[in-house]
Structures are given as structure tokens and as C-alpha cells.
Amino acid sequence: MDTTVKINSKTYQLQRYPKTFDKSLRAWSNAELLVLDYITDKNIEHVHLFNDRFGVWNCALQNKKVTTVWTYASQQTAIRQNLKLNNFSTEVDFKTPLDDLQHVEVALIKIPKSLELFELFLQQIHKASHEETVVVCGFMTKYFSSSFIKVAEQYFEEITQSKAWKKARLLILKAPKKEIQKKNLINTIQWKDKALQQYYGVFSSGNVDIGTQFFLESLVVKPEELRVLDLASGNGIIAYEVAKKNQQAEVTLLDDFNLAIESSKINLEGNKTEFLCDDSLENIKENSFDLVVSNPPFHFEHENNIEVALKLFTGVENCLKNDGRFLLVANSHLNYSTHLIKLFTSVSVLQQNKKFQIIECIKKR
């Protein structure tokens, strides 16, 4: 795996977090390098970074005043680890996509997979923009759609596209529009008698995804399952159903994505709940939960990778009480059972259809 990159005659060490055994994956893309090349000779004092997933921009722009808009807890960890690896200060000015930015001179965006998240970024920038604000967006050409240009046109008058370099291109946005129709940037999804709300960019924006629906159709929460963890909780729909089925239950929601956690706070307001934005279970005490429920992700931007889910499964085994249950729904082709039987005493498929399996794991010591 390549962990060394040269930028403007300086060499940096960059590692992915979470770690991966896939040697084809790097902690940077050519799109991010092309963005850096574009701004090299520009007189910039303060730069705002969006979707700097592993910290290549934070490292390369150490001589600037940098504000980093973070979306994932794992992203914060990755940035700090790579700053430390290169002997830079790990003090980072972090903001969330819901925070107001005071004044944006130059913003750099690695265009995310989610068109909605891209729009949320642009609206956040636009609120803090002035007539000289410039936004430099990098993308790999195979992942680009003209829809991203249509969204940008809602916020900026001037949009230009660069020539391709190593299968990467840039969108340069200038002249923020003076009059725009600001959106709430929250989707409403109807689920039975509940109108769920979730911020732009959170998984499955149009409806409750079919895997979760399949899971909820047969979900049973036992009366004695009073401490419950919803792992990779998204907008909180599974936790919401758990709370309905056992009103005595105390539910903890954990997700790597800060906008997912903020969405679930809206949907479970008033319930006995705890919300954690984290990418692992390392900060949760052993033997804490009677039940863990999950629709674990295996898509990360444009990558398919089960390594993160497998690490989470180890954490689940650690935080479950003796005789505790782990219920999850997963695409059948992922074959999670072969990994789970190494961790749990009992692993069985409770339900399945052509696409999904509902798996129950029991912990005994």
C-alpha cells in the first residue's frame, strides 16, 4: 500500500484510518492533489476544507489558517493521526456542516458521493461568502454527474471546469449569487405513523431502505432487554421501533456520521436515549448491553469494504452482556455468518429473502 506522497517538493506520510488490508486503497486521491496544485501560487491566508477524509489537505496546508468541516468521527481521528505522523500540531479548528462559518475566503471540497451533502456544503459556504469567495471542488471523472453542476448553479454565478489530470478534474465556483432560495436541507420520510426527519446526506433520503424495512418487520424486543445499542444508527428508525416495542428500554445510538446523529436526535426527542458520534465501540464498557441491533454499512463513499463492519462485530461481542443478543440485517452475499461464528457461541439466520438475511448472535461465556 502506498503511504508516501510528494506535494510541491515536500514528502508526506499518510495512512488510512480505519486501517485496511486492501493494498489498492490510498489515503489521498488525484482529485485532492489537483486541488492543491490549483491553489499553490494563490495568495490565501485562510482556507476552509470540506471532505478532507484522511487529512492530506490538513497536512499540505500547515502554513495556512485552516478550518476543517468534519462529517465523520473517523475522519477527525484520521486527520489527527496523519498530522501527528508528519510531526505537525494535532490542534485542528473543526466545524460541523451545521455550524455557521464567519467568513469564507477559499473553500476546498472533495466532492462527496452524496449530491445532497454537496448541496449542504455549498449552502453553508454561501452563508459566509462574499463577492471574492472561491470554491475549488475536486472529483474523479468516473464518479461525476452533471447534477453536481446544477446544484452549484443554484449558489454561484460562475462555474468552470478544468482539464483532466490523471482522471481527475476540478469545478471552480466564483461569484456567489446575491439572491438564493435557502432550503431547510432536511428530508421528511413517512414511516407508519411517524414522520422521520433527516439532514441532507444521511443514508436513504427518500424512504426507509428496504433492508431496514425487512429487519423491522420481524423485530422482537424482549421485556428483559432494557439496555439496547443501535449500532450504525442512521436517522434512528431502528432505535425508534425498539423504544416503541419496549418502553422501559434505554437506547444508545451510535453512528460515525455526525449528521446521522443530529437527525436521530430530532426523531427520538423525549425518549430515554443517548447519542454517540463515534466510529468504534472502544469507548463503551464491557458487558453493557442486553441487545445490539444494526444495519451495518459496507459502502463508504464509492468503496465497498466490510473491514469496518467486521471490526464493529468484535466490539459488539465485547460490549454485550452474557446471554445478550446481537441482531443485524445484511445483504446475503456478504456472508457475515462465517465471520460471526468466530465471535459468538450461537449464530443463526432468523429470516431471509432473495437479498437480505436477519442474523441473530448469542454471546455466552
Image (cartoon, helix red, strand yellow):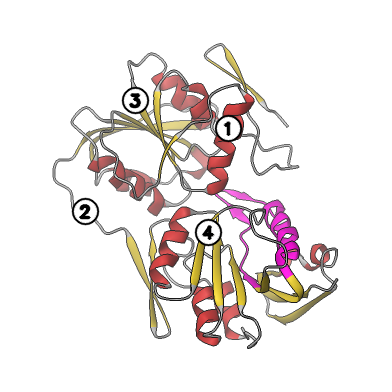
Amino acid on which the number 1 mark rests in the picture: Trp
Give whichever of discs 2 and 3 has the lower sequence position.
3
* Nearer the observer, 318 or 165: 318
Residues marked 4 and 2 touching at CB (< 8 Å): no
* Nearer the observer, 50 or 344: 344
Residues marked 1 and 4 touching at CB (< 8 Å): no
Quick check: 285 above or below 71?
Answer: below
Q: Secondary structure at mark 3?
A: strand
Q: Position of residue 77 (x, y in %)?
A: 58, 41
Give whichever of discs 1 and 4 has the lower sequence position.
1
Q: Which residue in the protein does label 1 denote?
A: 28
Amino acid on which the number 4 mark rests in the picture: Leu
Q: Quadrant of residue 224?
A: bottom right
Q: Which residues are magenta?
A: 292-320
333 relative to 59 in the view: left or right: right
How many angstroms separate mark 1 from mark 2 (CA)?
Answer: 33 Å
| In this view, the mark in front (1 or 3) | 3
Q: Position of residue 159 (x, y in %)?
A: 28, 34
Q: Which residue in the protein does label 2 denote?
A: 182
Q: Quadrant of residue 338?
A: bottom right
- Res 349 visible: yes
Q: Residue at x 56, y 11 (%)?
A: 9
Residue 46: which disc? 3
How many angstroms separate mark 1 from mark 3 (CA)?
Answer: 22 Å
Label 1: how many Cα within 10 Å (few below 14, some 14–19, many 20+): many
Q: Secondary structure at mark 2?
A: loop
Q: Secondary structure at mark 4?
A: strand
Give whichever of discs 1 and 2 has the lower sequence position.
1
How many angstroms separate mark 1 from mark 4 (CA)?
Answer: 27 Å
- Res 355 visible: no
